[in-house]
Image (cartoon, grey):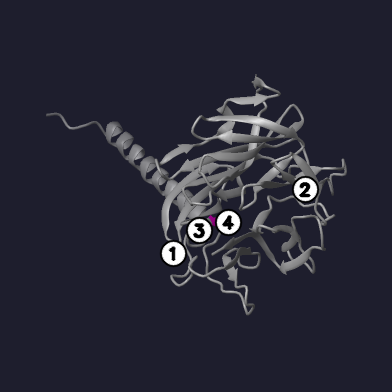
Amino acid sequence: MNPRPPQFRRLVLAVLAVLVLGGGSVGYVLHARHRGLPAATGDASFSLAESGLYYRDSATGRIARRSGTGGPPVTGGPACERFYAAGERALCLRKLPGVPARTQALVLDRRMREIRRVTVPGIPNRARVSPSGNVLSWTVFATGDSYATTAFSTRTSILDLRTGYLVTSMEEIPLTIDGTRYHAPDVNYWGVTFARDDNRFYATVSTRGRTHLVEGDLHNWSAKALRENAECPSLSPDGSRVAFKKKVSDDPAAPWRLFVLDLADMREHPLAETRSVDDQVAWLDDGTVGYALPGQEGRTTDIWSVPADGTAEPRLLVPGGSSPVAAD
């Protein structure tokens, strides 16, 4: 057999060099993307076993807990941008390093052990778990970074842990507005909240410059609009009311006001919090909601609470916190 000519050997060596260097580059990119990303789970001793207010600590980026009896917070939870917990599950949204933006949705058990991981494009924005812990939803910003502008797009996913089925985007759900099946290319969903039956849910849909509160049915995979100008709904523990933010001003610095809607008679009332709250509130009990506001004294955000009946003044709960959720 004739030996290969020198030019062939040079070609092979060149190809090998490209492959080696390319592999090194890929390895470096992967390493760079994950370098500095905190561990997916927190300390082994941190869990949902104790009742209290769980929240994201702005200083560390990790989940912490304050008990109702006072005392210092318990730290050491997982690192999350958004967090929510209910029933037997918790949902932790983490922004991955690198470009384009990606979000990692981590499903955790009550001991904060990871049981499922989903990666989607976008920036973490909203997280919710059904009261049983069986169904989870998260919203990410595909572009932009504020609901106060029109230059944004969202993607909302729903994960059913009973079947393992994942809906990566709700945009194709059959939607009815004013009794008519609705189609439009600019439909966006965000801010899902679940009822106790793991079937009924509420969410925001935006289209043609208007927002709507929609009621959805997971089993029949359908949604219908209930009213306009209601965003980021949160269903009360007893399932009778929805807290939401309503646009009351064209001032981009302060467009929102918190309201509560009674689902029985569809009457709404404003809450005593008069500042603009750009958050999906969390019901801390049947009579109180919690939410994040821009922080004081240089803090990123603070957690406040206010009665859901429209009385009393807001109360500062956690300086330097966000993503509040009451767990028991």
User: In what element is the residue under mark 3?
Assistant: loop
Q: Nearer the viewer, mark 2 or mark 1?
A: 2
* C-alpha separation, residue under disc 2 versus residue under disc 1: 35 Å
> Residue 111: which numbered mark, if any?
1
* C-alpha separation, residue under disc 4 versus residue under disc 3: 22 Å
Question: Residue reaching furthest front?
Answer: 264
Please report the residue visible at 61 percent of the width from the left and 51 percent of the height from the top: 238
Q: Which amino acid lies under the numbered mark 1 shown in the image of this protein?
A: Arg
Q: Position of residue 189 (x, y in %)?
A: 63, 36
Crowdedness of circle 2 by 10 Å Cα count: few (<14), some, many (20+)?
Answer: many
Please report the residue visible at 56 percent of the width from the left and 33 percent of the height from the top: 170
Q: Nearer the viewer, mark 1 or mark 3?
A: 1
Could you tell whether 164 is left or right of 96 in the image? left
Against 220, residue 320 (above or below) is below
Q: Which amino acid lies under the numbered mark 4 shown in the image of this protein?
A: Phe
Q: Main secondary structure of the magenta part?
A: strand
- Tell me, yes or no, if residue 96 can be seen here: no
Residue that badge 3 annotates = 35
* C-alpha separation, residue under disc 4 versus residue under disc 2: 23 Å
Give the mark, 1 or 3, whose residue is nearer the N terminus. Answer: 3
Magenta run includes residue 202: no
Residue that badge 2 annotates = 259
Q: Which amino acid lies under the numbered mark 2 shown in the image of this protein?
A: Phe
> Residue 83: which numbered mark, if any?
4
